Amino acid sequence: MTPPQEEVVAPAAAPKRPVGRTASTRPSATTSSPAATTPQRGDAADDGAHPVVLSISGLVKQFGDTVAVDGVDLEVRRGSFYGIVGPNGAGKTTTLSMVTGLLRPDAGSITVQGVDVWQDPAEAKRAIGVLPDRLRLFDRLTGSQLLYYSGVLRGLDPATVKSRTADLARAFGLDDALGRLVSDYSAGMTKKIALAAALIHSPRLLILDEPFESVDPVSAANVIEILQRYVANGGTVVLSSHGMDFIQRVCDHVAIIVQGKVLAAGSVDEVRGTGTLEERFVELAGGRKSAEGMEWLHSFSD
Ligand SMILES: Nc1ncnc2c1ncn2[C@@H]1O[C@H](COP(=O)(O)OP(=O)(O)OP(=O)(O)O)[C@@H](O)[C@H]1O
């Protein structure tokens, strides 16, 4: 992917209010392809216990001749663990970059808790914690300095930042690394410190682009448990991933994006139907490619 073009930093944190987990997220009722046969849940749009936290409508983004995002509609309700999947180049990162205010859409609208991300970015971003795909961190800071900066920038007082930093470092297994420069971290450690920075202000909505890439299985399990508890207490997670097993196991809702369009969206069970999510994904993404014509690879250069 290509790095986002525009960046804005949110100034303050939203208070956390514990609310029970829902199974009633209603993603886009209309999808932008004939392949969108997935039934949608019929829960009311004004479900008071689980209001819509994120609403995406008619989102479009084009880069030259490439239509990266082609009319995406999605709704995510409070307490959802929402997975976004799609083949390489499908438009996931472009969509999430527009949702988080990092990339300006060509058309469409995005609201977070009813606030338009592009009309009132500062207000919308108070509610969002972001793990961007291409990490742009201040990596000449130590881990501890980065978390301090992230927390104070979000309006937390230093004592709160200090205590949350200790909690996050313990949870992510970064205690021993906090005093080292982030530029010296491994890929997985960098991902984890960036995730910690996204969490520190206890946002209402977490947008995580491929959060488990390069993260070891034990750390991933810890992070998943943290996210599950966050969701169980009223937080909302939207993440992109290529891990179908993970999405099927952990997420309650999923959208499959192919060539910039949502081809299926709904609860994981609705989308996968009678097969696995991976089978549904392969079906919608156009099936496997043939390895024929690659015989030269077995000729070996020596
Ligand atoms: N800044 C940019 N300039 C030109 N083309 C871009 C830019 N950003 C993304 N694209 C193109 O838009 C399309 C969607 O890219 P995007 O990064 O959103 O896909 P993705 O679903 O996140 O892919 P992956 O799973 O590989 O990360 C691709 O064709 C990509 O080349």
Image: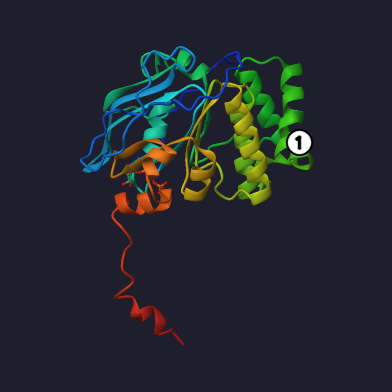
* Image quadrant occupied by the N terminus: top left
Circle 1 Cα neighbour tier, 10 Å, few/some/many (<14 / 14–19 / ≥20): few
Residue at 46% in and 49% down: 242
Q: Nearer the viewer, residue 60 or 286?
A: 286
Residue 126 visible in this rendered orientation of the protein? yes
Residue at 34% in and 27% down: 104
- Ligand 1 falls in quadrant: top left
Q: Nearer the viewer, residue 227 or 274?
A: 274
Q: SS class of the residue under badge 1?
A: helix
Residue 160 in the image, given as x and y percentages of width and height: 73, 18
User: Does residue 83 sit above or below 115 in this rendering?
Assistant: below
Residue type at mark 1: give it.
Answer: Arg
Residue at 33% in and 45% down: 90
Q: Residue furthest right?
A: 176
From the image, tell me which residue sits under label 1. Answer: 170
Q: Image quarter for residue 182?
A: top right
Q: Nearer the viewer, residue 78 or 73?
A: 78
Residue 243 visible in this rendered orientation of the protein? no
Residue 132 shown left or right of residue 183 in the figure? left
User: Does residue 195 sit above or below 258 in this rendering?
Assistant: above
Q: Nearer the viewer, residue 54 or 13?
A: 54
